[in-house]
Image: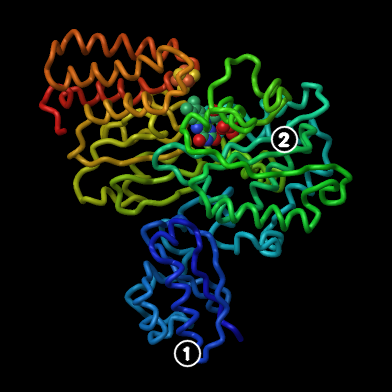
Amino acid sequence: MSTVVYVPKDASALSVGADRVATMIAREAQSRGIDLTLKRNGTRGMCWLEPLVEVVVGSERHGYGPVTDRDVAGLFAADFLRGGAHPLQLGRVDDIPYLASQQRLTFERVGVIEPTSLTDYLQQGGYEGLRRALSLQQHEIVQLVTDSGLRGRGGAAFPTGIKWKTVLDTPAPQKYVTCNADEGDSGTFADRMLMEGDPFSLIEGMTIAALAVGATQGYIYLRVEYPHAERSLAEAIQSAYSAGYLGKDVAGSGRRFDLEVRLGAGAYICGEETSMLESLEGRRGEVRVRPPLPAVKGLFGRPTIVNNVISLASVPIILRRGAEFYRDYGVGRSRGTVPIQLAGNIKRGGLVERAFGVSLRELLYDYGGGSASGRPIRAVQVGGPLGAYIPASQFETVIDYEALSGIGALLGHGGIVAFDDTVDMARMARFAMEFCAIESCGKCTPCRIGSTRGVEVIDRIRYGIDRQQNLQLLEDLCETMAEGSLCGLGGLTPFPVRSALRHFKDDFLKPPTR
Ligand SMILES: Cc1cc2nc3c(=O)[nH]c(=O)nc-3n(C[C@H](O)[C@H](O)[C@H](O)COP(=O)(O)O)c2cc1C
Ligand code: SF4
C-alpha cells in the first residue's frame, strides 16, 4: 500500500524550501522503488517547524521538521515512512504541545487536508453549514450568527449578525457580499493561512452570508502580495462551480451566488472597508464619509456585507454546530475563538487559535517560547501598526476586546509583534507617525498633515529640542488626530504613540539610536 506523505505548500513553508523537500522526497522514493503518495497540505501554523513533513503511519500523522532537502536521504535511511527515529522526529503531530493545547474551530482543517480538494473538504464536515442554512429562513440564519456572539475579526469587532441584519432589512434589487482579504496589519497572516489552507471554508461562509441577506454576487478583495492564496482560491472557486456549490443553483436550492476574486494593489488604506469598496469599483482607494454605512449603501451604491476572511470562515462552523456551541468558547462579550499570530522577535512564531481569555504571557512564553534573541521581551505591539505597545508589566492581560481596551490597547486582527529589551520605543513611536504619513489616503487634515508634523515633533523630542513644549504638542496632536480623523488610520495612530509615551517615556529622553 502506498504511504501518504504531506509536505505543506503554504507560502510560509515554501519560503523555507518546502518545494525542494517535496521534490527530493519524490525523487528518493522513486530511486528506492517505494510506492509513495505525496500530498500538499496547508501549514499547521507552527512556522518554526516548517517545512514540517508529515507521514501517515496507520491512522496517525507523524511529523519531522524543520526538514531541508539535504535531510531527505537520511530520513529515508531512518525509515521515516514507518515513523522511524531521527533527530528531526516530532512524534504525533496532534500531540505537539503548541498544537495540542489549541482550540481549533475556524482552522480545524488547515494543515490537515489538501486545501483545494473538495473531497477532503466534504469528508471533514465541509458544506454541512450550508446545508443547515438552506433549511432555515433568512432571518433565522442571521439570528443564529447574532446569537453566536461572533464579532468581526478584521479589527473593529462589530457584531457580524447585526451587520447582516442591516443588509437583510435594506430592500434593494441587488446586494453584495464582500470579503476583506487585504490583511495589511504587520505581523498578521491568519487570512492568508486560511485562504491557502482551507479556501472552501471562506467560500462556504460567503455563500451562507449571501443566502442570509439575499445577495447574488460576492467579491474577495485579496492583496496582490498573496499569489499562493490567489491560486488556491481560484482552484477552489472553480471546483465549487463545477460541483454546483456556486452559480445559479447553489446546492440544488434554486438560489444564485457568483463569486470572484479581485486583487488589490498594495495600499494599507485599501483594507479600510470604504476604501476597499472604492478600490473594488475601480477607483483609487480613498475613504468614504459615513453614513451611509456600506450595509445600507455599499458596493455600487447597494447594500453590502463587508467582512474579514476569518469572520466569514467562522460562519460554517456556527451553522454546523450551532450558535451555543460557538458562544460557549470565550469570555465576557468576546465569544468564540480567535487566531492569534505570533511574530517579530519570538522563538516559536506561528498561529495559535484559542478561545478568548488566553493571556499574553501564555501566548508569548508557553506558545512563543520567549524572544528569539533570548533577551527579555520588553514590549509587544498588538493589533497591527495602529495597535498599542504593551509593556511586560501588563502581560497578564487576556485576549478579550474589553480587557485590551481597558489598558488602552486593541486586538485588531490578532497580530502580536514582540520586541526585546534592545528596542527604542521613541523610534517605534516615530515609525507609527511615519507609517501613517506614508499610508494616509489624504482625505482629511488631521491624518494627512498631522502625521507628518508628528514625525517632526517626535524628532525634536528625541533630539532634545524644546522637549517639554514638544511633548505637550505631541499630546495635543494625538488628541486632534484621535478626535478629528475620518477613519481609523489617522484615528488610531495615537495608540502606538501614546502607549510608547505612557510606558516608555525614558526612551524619548535619551539620545536616539538612529
Ligand atoms: C486603516 C485600516 C485598515 C484596515 N485593514 C483591514 C484589513 O486589512 N482587513 C480587514 O479585514 N479589515 C481591515 N480593516 C477593518 C475594516 O475597515 C472593517 O472593519 C472590516 O473589514 C469589517 O469586517 P469584520 O467586521 O468581519 O471585521 C481596516 C480598518 C482600517 C481603519
Ligand atoms: S484618517 Fe487618513 S486615511 Fe483615514 S480618511 Fe483621513 S486622511 Fe484618509
Q: Horizontally, is 173 left or right of 440 in the view?
A: right
Q: CA distance from mark 1 to mark 2?
A: 55 Å
Q: Residue at x 34, y 54 (%)?
A: 348
Is residue 288 depicted above or below 360 in this figure? above
Q: Residue furthest bottom?
A: 33
- Res 147 → quadrant: top right
Against 329, is 169 above or below? above
Q: Nearer the viewer, residue 455 or 390?
A: 455
Q: In this figure, which residue is indicated by the disc labeled 2?
A: 144
Relative depth, front residue between 27 and 326: 27
Here the colouring is: rainbow
Mark drawn on residue 31: 1
Q: Residues within 10 Å of mark 1 (few under 14, many from 20)?
A: few
| Residue type, mark 2 in image | Leu
- Label 2 C-beta lies within 8 Å of the nearest ligand 1 atom: no
Q: Position of residue 430 (x, y in %)?
A: 27, 26
| Type of amino acid under label 1 | Ser
**What x and y, as percent, mark residue 445?**
42, 12
Residue sitting at x 15%, y 13%: 467
Residue 327 visible in the shown view: no
Q: Secondary structure at mark 2?
A: helix
Q: Is residue 375 left or right of residue 493?
A: left
Which quarter of the image is occupied by the N terminus?
bottom right
Q: From the top left corner, tell me how far across and down residue 64 is, in percent.
A: 41, 71
Asked if one can make out residue 217 in the rendered structure from this viewpoint, the answer is yes
Depicted 70 relative to depicted 328: above or below: below
Location of the C terminus by quadrant is: top left
Q: Element at badge 1?
A: helix
Q: Is 282 placed left or right of 6 in the picture? A: right
Q: Is residue 124 above or below residue 195?
A: below
User: In the visual, does 376 lie left or right of 244?
Assistant: left
Percent x, y of residue 380: 31, 36
